[in-house]
Image (cartoon, rainbow, N blue to C red):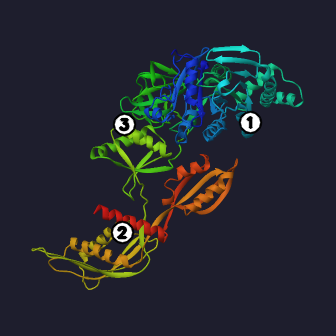
Amino acid sequence: MRSYSIEAIRNVGLFGHQGSGKTSLAEALLYTTGAIDRLGRVDDGTATCDFDPEEQRRHISINIALAPCEWHGTKINFVDAPGYLDFVGEVGSALDVVEAAILVTPAQGTPEVGFEIAWEMAASRNLPRAVFVNKMDRENADYQGVVGALRQRYGNTIAPLQLPIGSAASFQGVIDLVEMKAFIGSGKEVTCVEIPEEYKEEAARYRELLVESAAEGDDELIEKFLSGEELTHDEVVRGLHEGIDAGKVVPVLCGSALKDIGMTDLLDIIVHEFPNPLEFGAVHGKNPQTGAEEVREASESAPLAALVFKTIADPFLGTLSYFRVKSGVIKMGSTVLNASRGKEERVGQLYFVRGKNQEPTSEIKAGDIGVTAKLADTRTGDTLCDPAKPIVLDHTPFPEPVFEQAIVAKSKVDEDKMGPALQRVAVADPAFRYYRDPETGQTVIAGAGETHLAIVVERLKKFGANVEVVERKVPYRETIKAKAEGQGKHKKQTGGRGQYGDCWIRLEPNPGGGIEFVDAIVGGVIPRQFIPAVEKGIRQAAETGVLAGYPVVDFKVTCYDGSYHEVDSSEAAFIMAGILAFNNVAPKANPVLLEPILNVEVVVPSEMMGDVMSDLSTRRGRILGNESLGNGRMLLRAQVPQAEMLRYAIDLRSITRGRGTFSTSFSHYEEVPAHIAQSIIAKHKQEMAHAG
């Protein structure tokens, strides 16, 4: 692919909810432009942008994919972003490197949450955008219904640019509402004809909607429109152009990716209406040394500034870094500064990439997108720049993980490889975290949802670590609620020097005070040097509890009596005496089970508030309050036991159809209700019996 000037480049993101046909649309656009010579299919695993084996197996997009093509002397870099909600972080990364967005929705039903999220994120950046109503060739296609739903939600911003001719099996082309002409055919084989008689009335009605939207992008035009004057063709075109550029007008087009209908019109809109990187404006960031704002012109002559927006870890190719050059030129063999980490990197071979296919190049200029391999310290979100002109570019942070699972290695070999494999996956996936839970001893993986973590497990296998998901343990604790006392005596004679340790202790509650040890020995009944051993034994016994194997906390223990043997007593013997004393006395001190309680904040659409509150109540949650956030959204605060929140990310998504988000933080421990405690204790006893 030849090198293009910045004026002849368009960077366009493809967004929408899962199943809307974004990847199929990318495929059709590549085919129409001649970038590929065969139309692949997502369902067959042959689509250019779904090249990851997991994408092909699951028929969903997981990673950002690049799909560059050429149309009428312009290079268009399509950035295909996943629509599945587990990978919403990829949407933000894609939006960081494009100047315009195509929001894809099927003609069946109304736009879903993936579409809404991408719309809101694009709108917050004031990005020019268009809507493509896909799958007009399928049953139950209802273009008018989709346009009506969009206008109801987003108002006159929505400007229907086209009207379909036919639907489902009869879908054959579109009516251009600007030129008031009909276009029949697929691919490049499109014929311009007069609007069929049966569509003229509807076309006139939809053109009025288009003209109204075009007028709203310009004060002069809206005044003329409201006064009842008719806008000229040139005024409509001008209003649309200015409105699209300002993000105030969102044109709606339609077609079928699988039938390759509607692609040429969409490509023309991109080339003629969407801005090039130069028109989009200068690049802003911060000087990593001073914190001062830095500005770079979107020009080849400016100092280098490139944003790494995707990292892929491949067992065979190593690390691949996808980047967008915001200013300057990046050259093969050059030394650049990773300003985000303060480390220099040597740039190896550079590539233009289409799906998994790589085309080597010696340089990549401002405005363009490329890939390089084996950068040692560079991660997603990092800035590569001229060492003499450091800058850190803004980027969208990935959402914090909300769903956790525990994993165990399937063998000793897998256990040895698990740590390095986890690290390699985490390097490539900013939405993924892992840690060892000190409370439960489990290795925990955390991500955006069940599908995300299932894919993480598959990726771990690629790096040689076969693991399985096991039940996530809740870090319960135990404490006592009454005073009790008793003896711990360890006496053992084995034919030489024996073992002898004897202590009497008193346990009592110590709410919030941790473990407090009191030495009340008088008269030397236990020598001074053995007192710490008694405490050590008690603390050791407390670690494994007396009810269900969980640590005992918040108690005061007083050692007030005991005895010793001049020959057989030792530190080890008094440690055992302390263990025996605790295990004898704690069961008599009314031990209870404690559970962690989380502070939970849930943000949901107002109309879903009742369902979410009801669900939290069934989880033994206490509602603390709520407040309006505006834009029809509410913030709900509650405290909920951690045990009831293990699958909340999945359940909230189901309740709110993906429109709800939440965050948690630890609050405190409190006593587990008796009937639930009995179940936990019984399960522990069963596990111990099985282990024994």
Where does label 3 land, which residue? 462
Decide: is 475 above or below 62. below
Where does label 1 land, which residue? 148
Where in the figure is residue 61, as x and y percent of width and height?
51, 34
Choose the circle earlier in sequence order: 2 or 1.
Answer: 1
Where does label 2 land, which residue? 545
Crowding at dot 1, Cα within 10 Å, few <14 / some 14-19 / many 20+, comes out as some
Decide: is 279 above or below 113. above
Left or right: 419 as drawn, with respect to 493: right
Crowding at dot 2, Cα within 10 Å, few <14 / some 14-19 / many 20+, comes out as many
Q: Check disc 2 and report its element: helix, strand or loop.
A: loop
Q: CA distance from mark 2 to mark 1?
A: 63 Å
Q: Is residue 296 visible?
A: no
State which mark lies toward you, 3 or 1. 1
Q: CA distance from mark 3 to mark 1?
A: 47 Å
**Quarter that holds the C terminus:** bottom left
Residue visible at 67% across and 24% down in the picture: 171
Q: Check disc 1 and report its element: helix, strand or loop.
A: helix
Where in the figure is residue 226, as x and y percent of width and height?
87, 31
The amino acid at mark 1 is Gly
Q: Is residue 558 visible?
A: yes
Between residue 79 and residue 503, name the one nearer to us. 79
State which mark lies toward you, 3 or 2. 3
The amino acid at mark 2 is Gly
Left or right: 301 as drawn, with respect to 436: right
Q: Check disc 3 and report its element: helix, strand or loop.
A: helix
Where in the figure is residue 499, as x and y percent of width and height?
17, 75
